[in-house]
Amino acid sequence: KPLTDILQNIEGFIGYSENNFPKLHKGKSRSLILTELEDRLKIDLDYSSGKVLGAMTTPPHDFARYIYSKFIDRNLGDRGLNPGTAAIEKEVIEMLGNLLGDPYVDGNITSGGTEANIIAMLLAKQNNLDIKEPSIVIPDSAHYSFDKAAILMGLKVKRAKLLSNYHLDFDHYESLIDDNTIALVGILGTSALGLIDPIEKIGKLAGKYNKYFHVDAAFGGLVVPFMEELGYDFPPYNLKVPEICSYTVDPHKMGMSVNPSGSLLVKDSNVNSFKFEIPYLAGGAFPSYNILGTRPGASAISFWGLMQFMGKQGFVENVRHSLENTYYLKDQIEEIPELKIATEPTMNVLGIQMSSKANMSLDRFNSLLRQKGWALGVFKQWNLLRVVLMPHIKKSHLAEFLKDVKAIF
Ligand code: PLP
């Protein structure tokens, strides 16, 4: 369908033709435009309502927003013109590396987890140019960014099954590895349920079969280290696992920073690193891992400022708040006979399913919730709804949600 048709069907859309740019000879006033924008954007869901229950994003911290708008003109695509911004980017990578067990890691800020995962698969491919029919082994719970990478690079995707508790079937995973495998992927915080793959065990496979190993910690990379501070125990998951080649971590998820902000950390000691270089730039050529050319320096600067401002303690408190809400919601859901949780939560992500007592499909339940304004993630392949207890969710929002849920049954 053309975009105009889709937009025309969205409630509140004022009309494409009125604003048709070529017909708009004279500009409009700022106030008129702002009024129109506010009016039209009212249909977007607002985080402060607490109804955005299924997203892995949250409103950026005020200080990050402030820094972003102040330095919005900085372009990391031309680092020679922005040496200050480039140095800040390097420090952000170092700080993330430090948090995740290796301050000497290389890397770049990316637009998000998708870009970072695609670059990681590109690195794997560049490290295996002799393999003619390359494939990647990923858990079935892996994010779609790996499928995008596969389409772009002509890779075959081999998906390892999940067990009935949605954790990885490790034996099946190992059985998929063969001579054509160019990368093994493990996840720290799966998109559907926030579960953690056995990173150390996959690392051992990477060593045994001599494969590139990428960890997608887009979500969990800024949750798990803070949970450890709260006393939770995890098997080895970070850059200290020696076979890891690259690691995705997203500041625009649990890092509370502005969007777009992801990162790819690269252990260049393990990788024959491939960087893009643009020779003609005014500031000179500075190779980077990024697919994007022009890219927002303000993303790196904002997260640098936010880490300085919040300190580790600030992030720990955020995670504590999110976990308290997760366990509160889990306990409440378990008291509703028609519902059940999909599996024991590992971090601040909760899967909700219909129990055998429910005489309603998951689709119907979700659409009734949607009518009441609640936006949950939907994973049809596992028959579950996802709630991500992001920092903007308050207990009072959950109480409202539970009231609406109980009214449905
Ligand atoms: N990896 C995981 C585990 C994710 O959950 C997501 C998104 O939710 C991504 C990667 C992609 O991140 P982005 O939307 O920032 O591209």
Image (cartoon, rainbow, N blue to C red):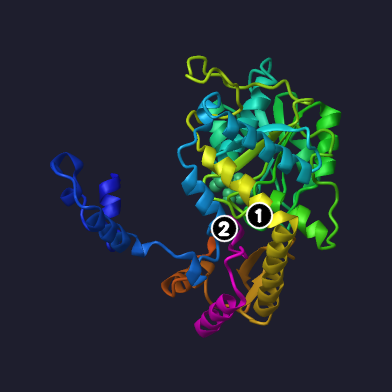
Q: Is residue 354 above or below residue 166?
A: below
Q: Is residue 288 magenta?
A: no
Residue occupied by mark 1:
309
Residue at point 73%, 66% (across, down): 320
Q: Marks 2 and 1: CB-CB under 8 Å?
A: yes
Q: Is residue 143 visible?
A: no
Residue at point 57%, 33% (across, down): 149
Residue occupied by mark 2:
61
Residue at point 55%, 27% (across, down): 79
Q: Position of residue 252 (x, y in %)?
A: 58, 50
Badge 2, how many Cα within 10 Å: few under 14, some, many 20+? some
Q: Is residue 98 visible?
A: yes
Q: In this figure, what is the number of numbered marks?
A: 2
Q: Is residue 66 above or below residue 290?
A: below
Secondary element under disc 2, as helix, strand or loop, is loop
Please, what is the three-letter code of the amino acid marked with disc 2? His
- The nearer-to-camera label among 2 and 1 is 1
Q: Position of residue 203 (x, y in %)?
A: 82, 37
Which sits in the foreground, 344 or 254?
Answer: 254
Secondary element under disc 1, as helix, strand or loop, is helix
Please, what is the three-letter code of the amino acid marked with disc 1? Phe
Image check: 66 left or right of 138? left
The span picked out in magenta is: 381-409
Q: Earlier in the sequence, mark 2 or mark 1?
A: 2
Residue at point 86%, 30% (across, down): 208
Badge 1, how many Cα within 10 Å: few under 14, some, many 20+? few
* Numbered tag placed on residue 244 in the rendering: none
Q: Is residue 396 magenta?
A: yes
Which sits in the foreground, 273 or 65?
Answer: 65
Q: Position of residue 340 (x, y in %)?
A: 66, 73
Image quadrant assignment for residue 108: top right
